[in-house]
Image: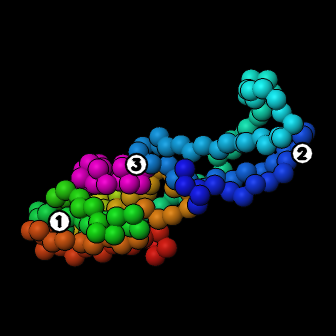
């Protein structure tokens, strides 16, 4: 553990409760962890200090999570394909999605973006609303229509899943706009 991962020393009083906060984010489909430790410094202790000779309690409270949403709007849907390049502070060069159909259902877009969203955002849930060429809401994507997809990460604590998403046109002529949580 490096020094920047350790706090300063604090003197504790037996029988008192103390608030310890650890900020982390859930990754890899809600399977992430962190650790905390208490070191007891006593100059008058003799022999081996063993943790089973004391009662130590730590309670973990999972507070409100900040779910990040990325909205993709595809106008004038066609039968072409596109890719998305997701960038964040950890991967400034980005992670490229697979080829996604511009007439994807919510589950098809979810599958297309699964690798990025699962490994770098803790998983995701994609919902979609579709409109025909006249702006009337329909159940499924239609050529010439519009699809509005909201990709919501499962559990983030304090950051955005992607701070930039770049549209890469393959064979689609559709117009695609992308918004992060702070723009929706």
SS under mark 2: loop
Question: Is 101 on the left-hand or right-hand side of 20?
Answer: left
- Front one among 24 and 82: 24
Between disc 1 and disc 3, whose residue precedes?
A: 1
Between 181 and 42, the one lying in front of the other is: 42
Looking at the rendered structure, which numbered label has been put on residue 151? none
Q: Bounds of the magenta span? A: 103-125
Are the residues at dot 1 and dot 3 in contact (C-beta closer than 8 Å)? no
Q: Is residue 114 magenta?
A: yes
Residue sitting at the far top: 52
Determine which residue is flagged by label 2.
Answer: 13
Q: Position of residue 144 (x, y in %)?
A: 17, 70
Q: CA distance from mark 1 to mark 3?
A: 21 Å
Q: Secondary structure at mark 3?
A: loop
Residue 121 placement (x, y as % from top left) = 41, 54
Q: Residues within 10 Å of mark 2 (few under 14, many from 20)?
A: few
Q: What residue is disc 1 on?
A: 82
Q: Which residue position is annotated with label 3?
A: 123
Q: Quadrant of residue 116?
A: bottom left
Q: Compute the Cα span from label 3 to label 2.
A: 41 Å
């Amino acid at each position: 553990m490096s020094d920047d991962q350790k706090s300063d020393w604090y003197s504790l009083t037996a029988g008192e409760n103390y608030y310890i906060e650890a900020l982390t984010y859930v990754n890899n489909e809600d399977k992430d962890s962190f650790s905390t430790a208490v070191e007891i410094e006593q100059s008058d202790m003799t022999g081996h200090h063993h943790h089973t000779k004391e009662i130590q309690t730590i309670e973990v409270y999972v507070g409100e999570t900040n779910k990040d949403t990325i909205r993709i709007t595809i106008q004038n849907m066609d039968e072409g394909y596109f890719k998305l390049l997701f960038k964040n502070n950890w991967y400034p060069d980005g992670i490229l999605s697979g080829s996604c159909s511009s007439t994807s259902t919510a589950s098809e877009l979810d599958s297309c973006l699964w690798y990025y969203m699962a490994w770098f955002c803790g998983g995701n849930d994609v919902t979609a609303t579709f409109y025909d060429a006249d702006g009337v809401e329909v159940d499924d994507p239609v050529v010439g229509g519009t699809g509005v997809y909201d990709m919501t990460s499962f559990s983030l604590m304090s950051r955005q899943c992607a701070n930039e998403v770049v549209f890469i046109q393959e064979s689609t002529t559709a117009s695609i706009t992308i918004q992060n949580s702070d723009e929706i």
